Image (tube, grey):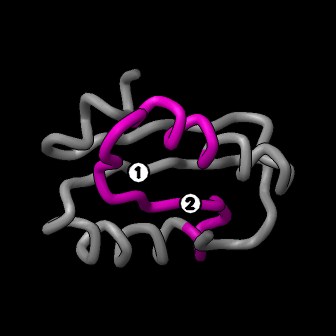
Amino acid sequence: VYGTRSERGIVIVADDAETSAWAQVAAELGQAGYQVIVLPRPEGDAAATVRAASDRLSQRGATGVVFIGSGRGATAALE
């Protein structure tokens, strides 16, 4: 998880090749006061994996979570 405990959370789901680029964005968002998780596009039950990431942010105090999907990860972010 990037950033410290915050009420604002972001889950980013990206293609494997884009994960490191999104990690840089996540670090900047963490410094701006968000808590952020970057996931490579999950295989199998993508919706459950994305929900689990959201739940983790909620456990850390996030009261609102935004989902961002990039490439094939966009479908998983919407599920």
Quadrant occupied by the N terminus:
bottom right
The stretch drawn in magenta includes residue 26: no
Residue 75, how many percent across, how many down? 26, 29
Whether residues under marks 1 and 2 lie with C-beta atoms below 8 angstroms apart, the answer is yes
View extreme (front): residue? 44
Q: Is residue 34 above or below residue 66?
A: below
Q: Residue at 72%, 51% (x, y): give it.
A: 56
Mark 1 or mark 2: name the one nearer the start of the chain: 1
Please give the residue where the numbered disc 2 appears in the rendered image. Answer: 36
Residue on which disc 1 sits: 12
Where is residue 51? Give x, y as percent.
Answer: 59, 35
Other residues around mark 1 within 10 Å, as few (<14) / some (14–19) / many (≥20)? many
Residue 73: mark: none
Q: Quadrant of the C terminus?
A: top left
Nearer-the-camera pick, 7 or 59: 59
Tell me if 4 is positioned left or right of 14 in this view: right
SS at circle 1: strand
Magenta-colored span: 30-53
Q: Which residue is at a point 69% across and 47% down the rendered structure image?
A: 8
**48 left or right, relative to 69:** right
Q: Using the rendered view, name the quadrant where residue 33 is placed.
A: bottom right
Which three-letter amino acid code belongs to the residue tagged 1? Answer: Ile
Q: In screen coordinates, is 67 left or right of 54?
A: left
- Circle 2 SS class: strand
- Residue 44 percent across, percent down from the top left: 35, 38
Picture residue at 30% right of the left edge, 41% below the top: 69
CA–CA distance between discs 1 and 2? Answer: 7 Å
Tell me the amino acid under the disc marked 2. Answer: Val
Q: Is residue 32 above or below residue 64?
A: below
